[in-house]
């Protein structure tokens, strides 16, 4: 039985900081640590300090959540982060400004915006992509835009030189997978569990089997996220994937230090450093 055909490569694949990063890591036989935080959480000043500190703490890629009033795919921790950020006055324009300020001192670390289509649609797709590219955004993960809606944002993003990163899940079957991977660039985000973010930890064998299945369809790096909270869990996932995404565990630190925000940055960056060390054990 012949191997499944890989999806057709995009006609104008994006070359970005993400591609350069994974090339460097592959040459060094290392894996990527992807750190998620919500832009503007818990306030604009602390969020900017967290963003600036994550690369030194070991984050290879920063996944920056765009606050939204109805983050339906996220668990309680990231929903709360969105609410804190919105209450602090964070906007989509403010998120792009935050990245632009970050780029004044760091032109290497890839930044991926993750969130929902509604704020981008309201902002205006063409204006958003132009402003995002100018600010230094490398990729987008938009959880509520399926492949059937590629004309809305995916193809314009590719044309603008911004990676469009798609989610694959345990329930993405062989029939659906080529559609999911088509026009995807940068990396594939494999959701290791069914359900919302921050729930049960992933099972290594099940994840390994699904990554092996994905690798038959794409040459893109595969990063695993959802449910990873400890350095040991990060190490286990890094052993079988090209990168590991951690979000809820980091965001929880912000919630836990709400009464004493003077501790927030140091505690979050300490956890990020421990998670990065777990990823780099492999």
Image (tube, rainbow, N blue to C red):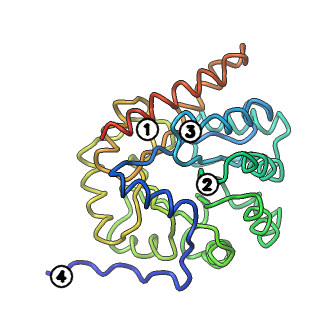
Mark 2–mark 3 Cα distance, whole angstroms, equals: 19 Å
Viewer-proximal residue among 190 and 262: 262
Find disc 1 in the rendering and name its residue.
Answer: 227
**What is the crowding at mark 1: few (fewer than 14 residues within 10 Å), some, or many (at least 20)?**
many
The answer to which of marks 4 and 3 sits earlier in the sequence is: 4
Q: Is residue 42 left or right of residue 167?
A: right
| Residue 134 rendering spot, x and y as whole percentages | 77, 63
SS class of the residue under badge 4?
loop
Between tags 4 and 3, which lies in front? 4
Quarter in which the C terminus is drawn: top left
Residue at 80% x, 63% y: name it: 131
Find disc 3 in the rendering and name its residue.
Answer: 75
Find disc 2 in the rendering and name its residue.
Answer: 112
The answer to which of marks 1 and 3 sits earlier in the sequence is: 3
Mark 4 and mark 3 residues within 8 Å of each other at the beta carbon:
no
The answer to which of marks 4 and 1 sits earlier in the sequence is: 4
Disc number for residue 149: none
Mark 4–mark 2 Cα distance, whole angstroms, equals: 36 Å
| Residue 135 rendering spot, x and y as whole percentages | 76, 58
User: How many labels were placed on the picture?
Assistant: 4
Mark 2–mark 1 Cα distance, whole angstroms, equals: 19 Å
SS class of the residue under badge 1?
loop
Find disc 4 in the rendering and name its residue.
Answer: 2
Viewer-proximal residue among 100 and 257: 100
- The outermost residue toward the bottom is 11
- The outermost residue toward the top is 260
Q: Is residue 3 left or right of residue 62?
A: left
Between tags 2 and 3, which lies in front? 2
| Residue 221 rendering spot, x and y as whole percentages | 40, 61
The answer to which of marks 2 and 1 sits earlier in the sequence is: 2
The answer to which of marks 4 and 2 sits earlier in the sequence is: 4
């Amino acid at each position: 039985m012949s191997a499944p055909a890989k999806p057709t490569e995009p006609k104008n694949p994006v070359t970005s900081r993400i591609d350069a990063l994974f090339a460097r890591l592959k040459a060094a036989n290392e894996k990527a640590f992807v750190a998620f935080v919500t832009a503007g959480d818990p306030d604009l000043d602390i969020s900017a300090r967290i963003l600036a500190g994550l690369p030194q703490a070991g984050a290879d890629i920063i996944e920056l959540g765009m606050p939204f009033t109805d983050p339906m795919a996220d668990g309680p921790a990231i929903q709360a982060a969105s609410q804190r950020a919105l209450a602090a006055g964070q906007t989509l324009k403010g998120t792009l400004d935050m990245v632009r300020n970050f780029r004044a001192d760091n032109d290497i670390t890839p930044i991926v915006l993750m969130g929902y289509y509604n704020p981008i649609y309201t902002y205006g797709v063409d204006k958003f992509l132009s402003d995002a590219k100018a600010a230094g955004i490398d990729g987008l993960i938009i959880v509520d835009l399926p492949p059937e809606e590629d004309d809305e944002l995916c193809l314009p993003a590719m044309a603008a030189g911004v990676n469009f990163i798609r989610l694959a899940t345990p329930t993405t079957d062989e029939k659906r997978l080529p559609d999911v991977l088509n026009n995807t660039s940068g990396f594939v985000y494999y959701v290791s569990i069914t359900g919302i973010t921050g729930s049960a930890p992933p099972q290594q064998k099940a994840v390994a089997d699904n990554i092996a299945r994905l690798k038959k369809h794409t040459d893109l790096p595969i990063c695993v996220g959802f449910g990873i909270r400890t350095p040991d869990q990060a190490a286990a996932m890094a052993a079988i994937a090209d990168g590991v995404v951690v979000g809820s565990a980091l965001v929880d630190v912000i919630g836990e230090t709400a009464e004493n925000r003077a501790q927030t940055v140091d505690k979050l960056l300490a956890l990020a450093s421990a998670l990065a060390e777990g990823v780099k054990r492999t």
